[in-house]
Amino acid sequence: MAGRRRGGLTRELKEELTVSEVRDRAIEIGGSGESGHPGKASVAASVRARIGALPPWAGIVTATVILVIALSASEPLFLTSRNLESVLTGMSPVLVMAAGTTMLITLGYVDLSIGSLMALSMVLLAGISGLGLPGIVVVLAVIAFAGAASGLTAGFLVGKVGLSFFVVTLGLLTIFRSAAQIPTKGIPQPLRGSGAAVVNWMSNATPGGIPAAFAIAFVVVLLAALLMSRTEFGNAVRAIGGNAVAARLAGIPVGRVKLLVFALSGLTVGIAAILFAGRGASADPNAGVGFELSVIAGVLLGGSSFQGGSGTFTGSLFGVAFVAFVQNGLDLNGVEPFWQGVVTGVVLIAAVGLELLRKRA
C-alpha cells in the first residue's frame, strides 16, 4: 500500500514539475540557499562577471605597477634617471615591433621572421648610409624596404596564395638571416655619413629628458591604435581575425587586408632596425635573434587574443614594459643575462595561460 502511495506521489510530482522548473528550482536553491543568503555559486558567478567586465589590459597594468613599486623599494638604482633612460631606450625597438605584431595578432597571425628582417634592414642601412644621401632619405628607404619585404613575401604568400603563416614566416626567418649574413660574412658593419647622424639622434638623443627612441616608439603605437580603432581598415582586420569566411562573404577584400597588415608590420620592423642600429652605431647581421619571442610575449601578456579578432595597444605597451622591467630587475640583482631567455619563455607561456583564464571567466 505504501509503495503504491509513493509511486502515486512521484507521478504527481512529475506531472506538476517540468524539467525546466526543476532546473530553475535547483539553481535557486544552490544560488541563494533556503535561508536567503548568497550561495557559493552566486558569489563565484559575481566574481567571474566582474573579472569579465574589466578591460583585457587591466591585469598587466596592475602587475606592472606592482613590479615598479617592488623594484623601487628593493633596488635604489632602479628609479635613477640613468637606469630608466636605459630601460626605455632598450625596450623601444621591441615596442615598435609590438605595434605591428598587435595588428597581426588581431588578424589571427604572428610573424616569426621579424628579428631576422630587422637584421637585414640594418645591413641595408649600413650599406646606403655612406652613399652621400640625405639622412632622412636613408631612414625612409630602410623603412620602406622592410615594409615591402614583409608585404611582398609573407603578406602575398599568406594573404593571396593561402599558405600557412607559420611555415611562411619560419622559412623567411632563415632566408632573411642568411641574406643579412652572406654579404657581411657575419661581421658587424659601421654606419657612416649623414645617415649615421640621423640614426644616432633617433636612437640616443634625449630631448627634454625623454629618450627620443621611446618617444618615436610611443608615437608609432599611438598611430597604430588610431588606425585600428578609427578606420574601416581596423574594422576589417578585426572582422577577418574573428571569422575570415564571414568577412569575405560580407565583401571585405580579405587577401588585400592581410597583405597590408604584413606590410605595416614590416614598416615597424624597419623603424626598430634604425633604433637598434643607432645604439651601437653599427649594423650587426646577427642581431635580433629571439626578438620575435619577446615581442609576441609582450603583446599576448597585454591581453591581445592569440586566436585573433581583438587586440589592445595599451596592453601591448604595458606588456613590453613589464618584460623590460623584469629583465632590468635581474640585471640590477646581478643575475646572468642568459636567464633572460628563461624569463621570456615563462612570460610567453603565462600570457597564453592568462588568456585562457580570461575566456573561462
Image (cartoon, rainbow, N blue to C red):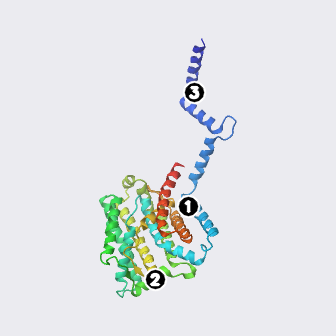
Indicate the quadrant where residue 127 lies: bottom left
Indicate the quadrant where residue 67 lies: bottom right
Label 3, label 1: how far apart the Cα atoms are:
49 Å
Residue at the disc numbered 1: 60
147 horizontally vs 228: left or right: left
Residue 63 picture location, percent across and down:
58, 61
Residue at the disc numbered 3: 17
Which is closer to the viewer, label 2 or label 3? 2
Dot 2 or dot 3, earlier in sequence: 3
The disc placed on residue 360 is none
Q: Mark 1 belongs to which amino acid?
A: Ile
Residue 129 picture location, percent across and down:
37, 84
Count numbered badges in the picture: 3
Q: Mark 2 belongs to which amino acid?
A: Asn
360 horizontally vs 282: left or right: right
- Disc 2 is placed on an element classified as helix
9 horizontally vs 285: left or right: right
Whether tag 1 and tag 2 are in contact, CB under 8 A, the answer is: no
Can residue 253 be seen here? no
- Disc 3 is placed on an element classified as loop
Residue 275 picture location, percent across and down:
45, 77
Residue at the disc numbered 2: 200
Q: In which quadrant is the N terminus drawn? A: top right
Which residue is situated farthest in the top direction here?
A: 1
Whether tag 3 and tag 1 are in contact, CB under 8 A, the answer is: no
Dot 3 or dot 1, earlier in sequence: 3
